[in-house]
């Protein structure tokens, strides 16, 4: 597929560390790259989460598409270029003594023709629980009718079983661009690639970057993942 035969879409996946760090730097990081979609992990999920989600979106120059408390901190934000058709949230079963986890989904249309679904999740730090959550997330992704753009903080690297579950049948954007050596965590001591963005094979990955700047090192404990895509236009 050539660039002229698809619809461009710029996506950011970002674990924002519950906005515990430099929020001005966080807003500047996102605004500087001008994304169409931001897939947030550790977004607002407690008291006044709606207002906090809206304020976060406004600081990025975006609007809320789906997620928040019902998706347990997974939040999908879009530019006005993207029309959201439907949104929904998923909660994974609670393991006693551990944190609740979930996922958010939004069916979207861009450029009046290209349909896709954006999905985001944040899996457990516990291996057994994480693998079960990955299977539930993957089941939802496989059932989608439109091409999917899925991002997650998987809390494990590409050699892990949960990563393999989610990646099956999808394109790892980092691998597609030869940049799987770019590490996403942590900003103070980068050692692991645990933040992933996967796309339907019908979607072309044009570019991929892990944004490592003085601002991103102040904004969160994770680096943002920035991906340029070409969506298949509707016939």
Image: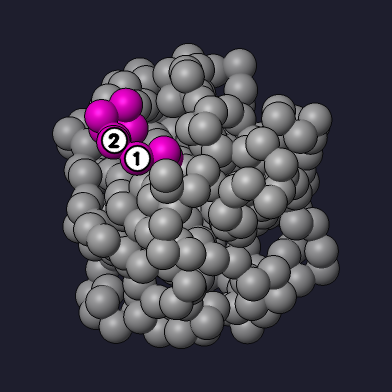
Report the front residue among 151 and 37: 37
- Residue positioned most to the front: 235
Pick the residue in front: 87 or 203: 203
The percent coordinates of residue 21 (x first, y second) are 59, 71
Q: Residue 199, relative to residue 18: is it above or below?
A: above
State the extent of the magenta-drawn residues as a range. Answer: 140-148
Residue 127 shows in the view: no
Residue 18 position (above or below residue 134): below
Residue 141 is a magenta residue: yes
Please tell me whether mark 2 sits on a helix, a strand or a loop.
loop
Tag 1 and tag 2, C-beta contact below 8 Å: yes
Q: Position of residue 183 (x, y in %)?
A: 74, 39
- Reading the image, the residue beneath label 2 is 144
Q: Residue 186's spot in the image, x, y percent?
A: 68, 47
Mark 2 neighbour class, 10 Å CA radius: few under 14, some 14 to 19, many 20 or more: few
Q: What residue is rendered at 44% in x and 25% in y? A: 166
Count neighbours of disc 1 (C-alpha within 10 A) and say few if under 14, some if 14 to 19, many if 20 or more.
some
Is-magenta flag for residue 226? no
Asked which secondary structure carries label 1, the reply is: loop
Relative placement, left or right, of 127 versus 175 is left
Query: Which quarter of the figure has residue 12?
Result: bottom right
Is residue 152 shown left or right of residue 131?
A: right
Q: Quadrant of the N terminus?
A: top right
Report the residue at 22% width, 51% height from top.
89
The residue that label 1 is drawn on is 146
Separation of disc 1 and disc 2 at Cα?
Answer: 6 Å
Q: Position of residue 98 (x, y in %)?
A: 28, 38
């Amino acid at each position: 597929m050539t660039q002229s035969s698809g619809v461009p879409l710029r996506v950011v996946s970002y674990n924002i560390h519950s906005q515990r760090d430099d929020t001005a730097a966080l807003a500047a990081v996102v605004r500087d790259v001008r994304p169409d979609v931001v897939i947030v992990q550790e977004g607002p999920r407690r008291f006044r989460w709606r207002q906090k989600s809206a304020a976060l979106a406004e600081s990025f120059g975006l609007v809320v598409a789906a997620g928040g408390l019902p998706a347990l901190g997974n939040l999908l934000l879009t530019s006005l270029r993207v029309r959201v058709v439907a949104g929904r949230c998923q909660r994974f079963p609670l393991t006693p003594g551990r944190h609740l986890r979930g996922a958010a989904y939004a069916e979207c249309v861009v450029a009046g023709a290209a349909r896709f679904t954006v999905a985001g999740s944040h899996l457990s730090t516990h291996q057994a629980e994480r693998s079960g959550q990955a299977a539930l997330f993957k089941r939802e992704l496989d059932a989608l009718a439109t091409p999917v753009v899925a991002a997650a903080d998987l809390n494990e690297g590409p050699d892990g079983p949960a990563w393999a579950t989610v990646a099956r049948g999808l394109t790892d954007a980092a691998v597609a661009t030869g940049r799987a050596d770019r590490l996403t965590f942590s900003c103070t001591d980068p050692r692991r690639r645990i933040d992933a963005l996967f796309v339907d094979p019908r979607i072309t990955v044009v570019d991929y970057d892990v944004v490592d700047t003085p601002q991103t090192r102040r904004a969160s404990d994770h680096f943002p993942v920035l991906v340029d895509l070409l969506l298949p236009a509707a016939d």
